[in-house]
Every structure is written in structure tokens, then in C-alpha cells.
């Protein structure tokens, strides 16, 4: 049975799909799985309007465009075992004008993107939740090497590491309502975290060893709240 093997997604059906001896451990209600239903992530994304695309372990080369779809894209075995590699050909993951509650991207390493904006993740106008991600070794020619978000919608990040990106770590603009928790941005060529017209909260964050400062905050119409934020070891004082 192709749905029952050591590499299968553990779906919430009372069956030990991945043959690890435990049924429904870390299960995901997958609508489509890669590579079991589709050979490529983009193929699975194109086939759904809403729902969850589960990605199996391994390195997946190519770009993923969620367009305006409120999809959940999840690496079922986490960022340590599931990598999206952009191969220097654009933004690795693009999110369009997704309405609330937004797209969800979680459990993935996202690397080797090359674009003007948002080489790792580019959020263009929509809402998004980013969780349990490693975004590393991406290069933006302008801003947002790791993550770029130009959106008036909500942007939630939890347990996200943004490491060693060129063109800065994270750039957020457009009036986004942010909720950032347990964020690590380090070794950026550029500023670690740039908040240009955002509002909301940043909690339990570490912004270190970035070449143009850890944090830049400008054009905010509503106060930003910071709690337990470490800014240290950057080449500028911010």
C-alpha cells in the first residue's frame, strides 16, 4: 500500500501510516502529499484551492508559488529533514494576496533563493503564518533576503530562524499587523529586521551579527511593542 510505508505522511486516520509503531503521532490532515500524490510541490499546489499540501522529507529543488490560495504548506518531518532549494532561480516561496486567515508555511528549510525582493519568502499583499522554519542562504538584490512582506494584512511568525541571508534578513512594509514570537535573525548581509510601517508585537527575538544593524523601525503609525529582544554583535548599534 503506497500510503503505508516508512516515508509516508502520518495522517489523522487512526492508522500508523509511517510505520513507526505509533498511530497519528504528529499527524497532519493532508489533502495532497508530495511525492505520494504529486511528484512536485507546485503540482500539488496547483491542484488545490484550499487545504493542506504535505511535503515529505528530502530536498525539493524549484520554486513554489501559492498565488492567492489560503493553503497550508507543511514539511511533515520538520525543517531538519525537509528543504526547499530555489537553486538561485527566484523567490523560493511566493504568497500572493491571500485573504485572512492567510496562507500557512511551516516545518521547512528554505534556501538558495535569488530575487530582487524576498529571495526566501516573498509575501505580496496577503496574510500569512510562518512557523517552525529555517530560512537561510538566500540573496535579495534590493531588500528582504530571507523574508520580504509588503502587505496590510496580518503576519504571524513563530519559531523562525533567518540565517546568513544577503540583502538583509527580514523586511516588512505596507502596514502589516505583526505578531512575531521566538525569532532568530543572524549573520545577515544587511539589517536583521526592518519594520517599515508595521504595527504589533515582537517577543523573544534575537537579532545578532548582522552587518547593518539588528533592527530598523520607521514609518509606524501605531506603536510597536518589543519584549525580550536581544540586539547584539551587529556592525551598527541598532
Image (cartoon, helix red, strand yellow):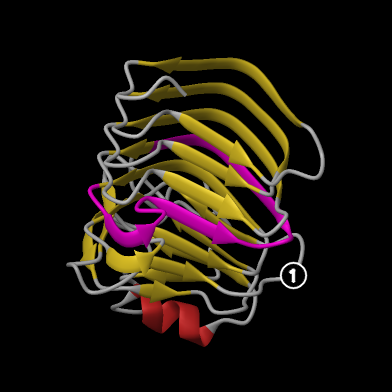
- Please, is residue 30 above or below residue 65 in the view? above
Which x, y percent locates residue 150?
A: 59, 62
Most extreme residue toward the right is 222
Crowdedness near tag 1: few (<14), some (14–19) or many (≥20) residues, C-alpha within 10 Å: some
Which SS type dominates the magenta stretch? strand
Which residues, given as a range, are shown in magenta?
Answer: 137-161
Which x, y percent locates residue 219?
A: 69, 47
Q: For residue 36, what is the image quadrant?
A: bottom left
Most extreme residue toward the left is 87
Which x, y percent locates residue 213?
A: 39, 29
Residue at x 31% of width, y 59% of height: 140
Residue 114 in sight from this viewpoint: yes
Asked if the stretch drawn in magenta spans residue 157, the answer is yes
Asked if the stretch drawn in magenta spans residue 171, the answer is no
- Please, is residue 95 above or below residue 15 in the view? below
Residue at x 17% of width, y 67% of height: 87
Who is closer to the viewer here, 29 or 217?
A: 217
Who is closer to the viewer here, 171 or 147?
A: 171
Residue 25 in sight from this viewpoint: no
Q: For residue 33, what is the image quadrant?
A: bottom left
Who is closer to the viewer here, 108 or 200?
A: 200
Residue at x 22% of width, y 48% of height: 137
Number of residue marks: 1
Q: Label 1 belongs to which residue? A: 99
Which x, y percent locates residue 225?
A: 73, 26
- Helix, strand or loop at disc 1? loop
Q: For residue 1, what is the image quadrant?
A: bottom left
Residue at x 29% of width, y 72% of height: 90
Left or right: where 221 falls relative to 21: right
Left or right: where 26 falls relative to 161: right
Amino acid at each position: 500500500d503506497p500510503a503505508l510505508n516508512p516515508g509516508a505522511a502520518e495522517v489523522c486516520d487512526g492508522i500508523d501510516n509511517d510505520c513507526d509503531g505509533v498511530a497519528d503521532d504528529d499527524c497532519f490532515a493532508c489533502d495532497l502529499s508530495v511525492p505520494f500524490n504529486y511528484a512536485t510541490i507546485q503540482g500539488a499546489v496547483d491542484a488545490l484551492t484550499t487545504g493542506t499540501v504535505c511535503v515529505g522529507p528530502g530536498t525539493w529543488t524549484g520554486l513554489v508559488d501559492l498565488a492567492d490560495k489560503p493553503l497550508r504548506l507543511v514539511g511533515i518531518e520538520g525543517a531538519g529533514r525537509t528543504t526547499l532549494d530555489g537553486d538561485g532561480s527566484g523567490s523560493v516561496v511566493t504568497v500572493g494576496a491571500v485573504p485572512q486567515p492567510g496562507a500557512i508555511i511551516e516545518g521547512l528549510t528554505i534556501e538558495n533563493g535569488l530575487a530582487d525582493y524576498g529571495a526566501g519568502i516573498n509575501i505580496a499583499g496577503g496574510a500569512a503564518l510562518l512557523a517552525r522554519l529555517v530560512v537561510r542562504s538566500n540573496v535579495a538584490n534590493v531588500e528582504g533576503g530571507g523574508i520580504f512582506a509588503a502587505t496590510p494584512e496580518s503576519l504571524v511568525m513563530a519559531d523562525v530562524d533567518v540565517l546568513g541571508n544577503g540583502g538583509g534578513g527580514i523586511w516588512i512594509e505596507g502596514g502589516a499587523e505583526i505578531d512575531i514570537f521566538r525569532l532568530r535573525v543572524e549573520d545577515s548581509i544587511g539589517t536583521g529586521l526592518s519594520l517599515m510601517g508595521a504595527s504589533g508585537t515582537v517577543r523573544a527575538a534575537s537579532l545578532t551579527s548582522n552587518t547593518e544593524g539588528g533592527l530598523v523601525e520607521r514609518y509606524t503609525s501605531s506603536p510597536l511593542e518589543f519584549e525580550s529582544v536581544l540586539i547584539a554583535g551587529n556592525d551598527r548599534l541598532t
